[in-house]
């Protein structure tokens, strides 16, 4: 396991007492993150430790596409189709079914984790 220490020892992360020196004992290690930047915010919020910040670029997620069929709409569309008095061919029936399915189908794109 290869870890990279990015804490800058020139900027102490803990304030020492009058008999102690300031130290950098709060360390930040990273693994497999390029272009990371460490900074000491210099805010202690009443503690003897400073707040540290780590900044690194993130990769945007690819949009994912999903196909969603509204089954209620498909049933309604199939029910409302006028019945044929003559038997239809398999090709005609298949074409009508495909058209009804396409009418009830939507494509949804999202970049949210799923």
Image (spheres, grey):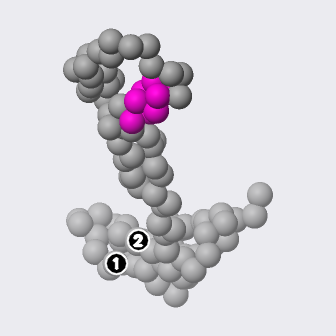
Question: Counting other residues with Cα less than 10 Å from the Cα at mark 1, is it few (<14), some (14-19), or many (20 or more)?
Answer: few
Q: Residue at x 46, y 72 (%)?
A: 54
Which of disc 1 and disc 2 is earlier in sequence? 1
State yes or no: discs 2 and 1 in contact (Cβ < 8 Å): yes
Highlighted magenta segment, given as a residue range: 92-99
Question: To which residue does mark 2 refer?
Answer: 52
Residue 62, numbered circle: none
Tell me: residue 113, above or below residue 14.
Answer: above
Quadrant showing the N terminus = bottom right
Question: Looking at the picture, how far across and down is residue 82, in whole percent?
Answer: 25, 19
Q: Distance between the Cα atoms at labels 2 and 1?
A: 6 Å
Q: Quadrant of residue 68?
A: top left
Q: Residue furthest right?
A: 1
Q: Height in image: 69 above or below 1? A: above
How many labels sit on residues?
A: 2
- On the question of residue 49 being in view, the answer is yes
- Callout 1: helix, strand or loop? loop
Residue under pointer 1: 41
Image quadrant where residue 28 sits: bottom right
Judged left or right of residue 76, residue 17 is right
Residue in the foreground of this view, choosing between 58 and 85: 85
* Place of residue 83 in the rendered image (x, y in percent of width and height, measured from the top left): 29, 15
Residue displayed at 27% across by 22% down: 81
- The picture quadrant where one finds residue 72 is top left
Relative to 83, say whether 70 is above or below: below
Where residue 6 appears, as percent x and y from the top left, is 58, 76
At 28% from the left and 74% from the top, the residue drawn is 43
Is residue 96 shown in magenta?
A: yes
- Most common secondary structure along the magenta stretch: helix
């Amino acid at each position: 396991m290869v870890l990279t220490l990015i804490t800058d020892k020139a900027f102490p992360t803990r304030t020492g007492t009058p008999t102690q020196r300031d130290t950098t004992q709060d360390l930040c290690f990273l693994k497999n993150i390029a272009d990371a930047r460490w900074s000491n915010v210099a805010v202690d919020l009443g503690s003897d430790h400073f707040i540290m910040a780590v900044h690194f670029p993130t990769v945007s997620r690819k949009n994912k596409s999903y196909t969603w069929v509204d089954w209620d709409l498909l049933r309604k569309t199939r029910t409302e189709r006028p019945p044929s008095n003559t038997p239809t061919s398999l090709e005609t029936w298949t074409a009508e079914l495909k058209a009804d399915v396409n009418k009830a189908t939507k494509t949804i794109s999202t970049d949210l984790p799923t």
